[in-house]
Image: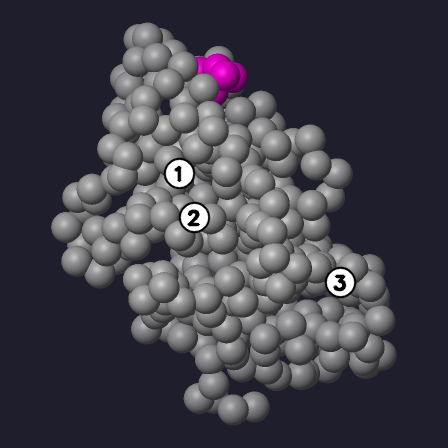
Amino acid sequence: MNDDGPVLLHTQGHALYITLNRPRALNALNHTMVRSIDAALAGAECADEITSVVIGGAGERGLCAGGDIRTLHDDARAGGRSSLEFWRDEYRLNARIARFRKPYVALMDGIVMGGGVGVSAHGSIRVVTERSQVAMPETGIGFMPDVGGTHLLAAAPGELGTHLALTGRSVGAADALLCGLADHFVRSEHLPELTAALATSATPGEVARTVLRHTSEAPGGELASARHWIDACYAAETVEDILERLHGSGLPEARETAATLLTKSPTALKVTLAAVRRARALDSLEAALDQEFRVSSRAFEQPDFVEGVRAQIIDKDRNPQWKPAGLAEVSDRDVARFFAPLGPDEQELGLAVDTGTDGD
């Protein structure tokens, strides 16, 4: 095992351990990492001695904060195209994880956001801890949920997924379980023991039982008690109507949520709402990823993405100047353009997910 690489691979017993190893960058994913994980999974699927794959993050802060936003920002600002290649391979990896034939154990400890959700929440065994903070925060940087996030959030109970997609708020363990983003709660102090025990689990059944032996009940969350106003407000047809219901609910938490939404990119809010609702009607993760590739490709060309990353990540002034600045200026036609076929670029750069199980 090379301890210096951005992805560490280590086989012990019956388990392949994948560790995202950029702790200073909170294990943010770059193209090299995506390709390394994909190749490791292709090999593990064909290796009879490997019973399970376990993915975690180096350092104390979390599994992964998402994609390497600075690199994407610089590419967009320079008018480049490499980000589209990165997304295509990243989305293919998300699909491979979801279709992986062996137990894929994701240790979602600490911060798990954006691309971190993509390499964990599509797995077959998803473990959260009392330290977990799970989010798809893209609307705050003028972008939209991707990496299969619209597929996951569309399947959440009621309108919880819509709420999380638009606000970008992070949730703890209990709420991640409620929303279907995770399967089991394990206290962080027990993760080393669980991780080691998976090496001796020789069958998928043993892997499942090993995880269950380490689980306990998650501390209480917040979303279950908020379902009454979340479902009522987010069932509205448009973002403007959602805001009106939030303001009119009479609940302080709903009004605070409305204030949060008004800080997000108006274009990102409207496209995200459409993307989650369209994802509900799609029949597979792959279809949602194809849709997300179109949306991401179009968002990459818009000024809000560069401006959002500048304000939140680079200059950190937290004062993005969105264009357009108001919801009324984003028309239905503007939103529809994000979902239109990409033309020649769709054939060159579009997502062609391999759902085969031969590991190629």
| Residue type, label 3 | Asp
Magenta residues, start to end? 233-237
Circle 2: residue type: Ala
User: Residue tagged by mark 2?
Assistant: 299
**In the visual, does 352 lie left or right of 260?**
right
Question: Compared with residue 186, is residue 224 higher up or lower down, i.e. above or below?
Answer: above
Residue to which mark 1 is pinned: 268
The quarter of the image holding the C terminus is: bottom right
Near mark 1 (Cα within 10 A), the count class, few <14, some 14-19 or many ≥20, is many
Residue 15: where, in percent of width, then height? Answer: 70, 75
- Tell me which label, 1 or 3, sits earlier in the chain: 1
Q: Residue at x 32, y 38 (%)?
A: 265
Disc on res. 164 = none
> Counting residues from the N terminus, which is met first, the one under dot 2 or under dot 3?
2
From the viewer's perspective, is the residue at label 2 or at label 1 nearer?
2
Q: Could you tell me which residue is drawn at 44 percent across and 88 percent down?
A: 4
